Image (cartoon, grey):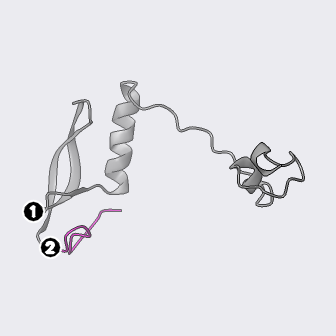
């Protein structure tokens, strides 16, 4: 799905153009031939899903992109205990500061 932006969502300018250039990572690794839309006013670049996949594939090929971490899901009832917001004291008792 190609992006077809008429306005920049960052600055609101209508000066958005489609370009093909290179994607540069924070450590200077360059991936040429990536298509994106760029705002001529603020310089922000916007990548469509196809370009994002191409970037991910290129980074994976050279070992610079690791596999996504496993996402764990918990039932809604136990989620507060997992993130430390459970104050019921039922399972683990009260905190020392609450005794």
Disc 2 + disc 1, Cβ < 8 Å: yes
Q: Residue at x 76, y 51 (%)?
A: 81
Q: Nearer the viewer, residue 98 or 44?
A: 98
Q: Secondary structure at mark 1?
A: loop
Nearer-N-terminus badge (2/1):
2
* 96 and 92: which is toward the camera: 96
Residue 78 found in image quarter: bottom right
Of all residues shown, which one is farthest toward the right?
A: 90
User: What residue is rendered at 14% in x and 55% in y?
Assistant: 19
Image-based side of 77 in relation to 2, left or right? right
Mark 1: few, some, or many residues within 10 Å (few <14, many ≥20)? some
**What SS does tag 2 mark?**
loop
User: Can you tell which quarter of the image residue 1 is in?
Assistant: bottom left
Q: Residue at x 84, y 58 (%)?
A: 88
In this view, which residue lies farthest toward the top? Answer: 63
Q: Which residue is mark 2?
A: 13
Mark 2, Cα crowd under 10 Å, few <14 / some 14-19 / many 20+, is some
In the picture, measured across the screen, residue 77 lies left or right of residue 29, that is: right
Q: Which residue is mark 1?
A: 40
Would residue 12 be counted in the magenta stretch? yes
Magenta span of residues: 1-14
Please name the residue shown 71% across and 49% down the image.
Answer: 84
Asked if residue 57 lies left or right of residue 95, the reply is: left
* Magenta stretch: helix, strand or loop mostly: loop
Give the x, y percent position of residue 62.
36, 24
The x and y percentages for residue 29 are 24, 30
Say above or below: 58 vs 82: above
Residue 50 placed where, x, y %? 35, 52
Q: Where, by quadrant of the figure, is residue 87 drawn?
A: bottom right
Q: Which of these two is toward me, 66 or 58?
A: 66
Say which mark, if any, is on residue 25. none
Up/down of 10 relative to 83, above or below? below
């Amino acid at each position: 799905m190609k992006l077809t932006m008429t306005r920049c969502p960052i600055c609101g300018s209508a000066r958005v153009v489609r370009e093909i250039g290179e994607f540069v990572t924070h450590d200077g690794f360059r991936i040429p031939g990536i298509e994106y839309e760029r705002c001529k006013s603020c310089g922000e670049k916007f990548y469509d899903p196809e370009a994002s996949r191409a970037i991910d594939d290129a980074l994976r090929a050279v070992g610079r992109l690791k596999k996504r971490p496993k996402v764990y899901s918990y039932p809604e009832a136990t989620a507060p205990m997992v993130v430390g917001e459970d104050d019921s004291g039922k399972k683990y008792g009260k905190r020392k500061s609450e005794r």
